[in-house]
Amino acid sequence: MKTSCRTMMVGLIGLWLGGCSVVVFEDSAACPAQKTCPIDATKVAPVPKGTEPNELEQDDTAQNITSADETASSASQQQGTVGQTASMSAVDVVNQIDGHLSYFDVDSADLRTPAISGLLFVAEYLKANPTERILVEGHCDERGTRDYNLALGEKRAEAIRVQLVRQGVDHSRIKTKSFGKERPAMLGASPEAWAKNRRTVIRLISG
């Protein structure tokens, strides 16, 4: 019996010294779960060089491909936007000239600073297109008599023509007409409506 026990003890000690080279249960005292069993490096097959790319290198390659695709897509979109802008720029300019508005204070034909700044754009367009002519419409709000508002509308239209001439436009290319209070931009007896109606409107004349 004693010989048998000694044999088992020697065997267990041999297993312990062998570094847990046999399979044991997690709860086995021979190799506790919290201890790491040493790995025999001679039994691990080396990965041949060149057969598997590094995981980070794979990610970098994928990111570089994605970045290149996004750059090409962005460049294509920018080219499309540039082409669209170039093809529509002339139409946009005409739309900004035809219907150009300037607003006035009550009972006044004096040009405000924003109106003068806006007319610079109109003047540059007319100077670049010497065959174009314009009509300046003068408008008023609903208050006052018809004759008074017709006269005030004419003064407002004339103020626009004088300013464009100062900015280099030939006066013969600018006609004026007053509509007084007959064509309101906004209906209603309110300060907001009155402010919208005290205005001039520039129209391009075809032919």
Image: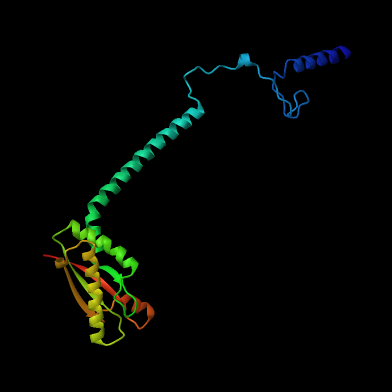
- Colour scheme used in the picture? rainbow
Q: Position of residue 48 (x, y in %)?
A: 50, 17
Position of 38 relative to 89 (above/below): above
| Residue lying at 28% horizontally and 69% vertically, measured from the top left | 101
Residue reaching furthest to the left: 207
Answer with left or right where residue 121 lies relative to residue 190: left
| Residue lying at 47% horizontally and 29% vertically, measured from the top left | 58
Residue reaching furthest to the front: 166
Quadrant of residue 162 within the rendered picture: bottom left
Position of 105 relative to 41 (above/below): below
Position of 147 relative to 92 (above/below): below
| Residue lying at 78% horizontally and 25% vertically, measured from the top left | 29
Answer with left or right where residue 34 lies relative to residue 171: right
Q: Position of residue 163 (x, y in %)?
A: 25, 67
Q: How many tags in the picture?
A: 0
Between residues 95 and 111, which one lies in front from this camera angle?
Answer: 111
Q: In which quarter of the image is the N terminus?
A: top right
| Residue lying at 21% horizontally and 65% vertically, measured from the top left | 165
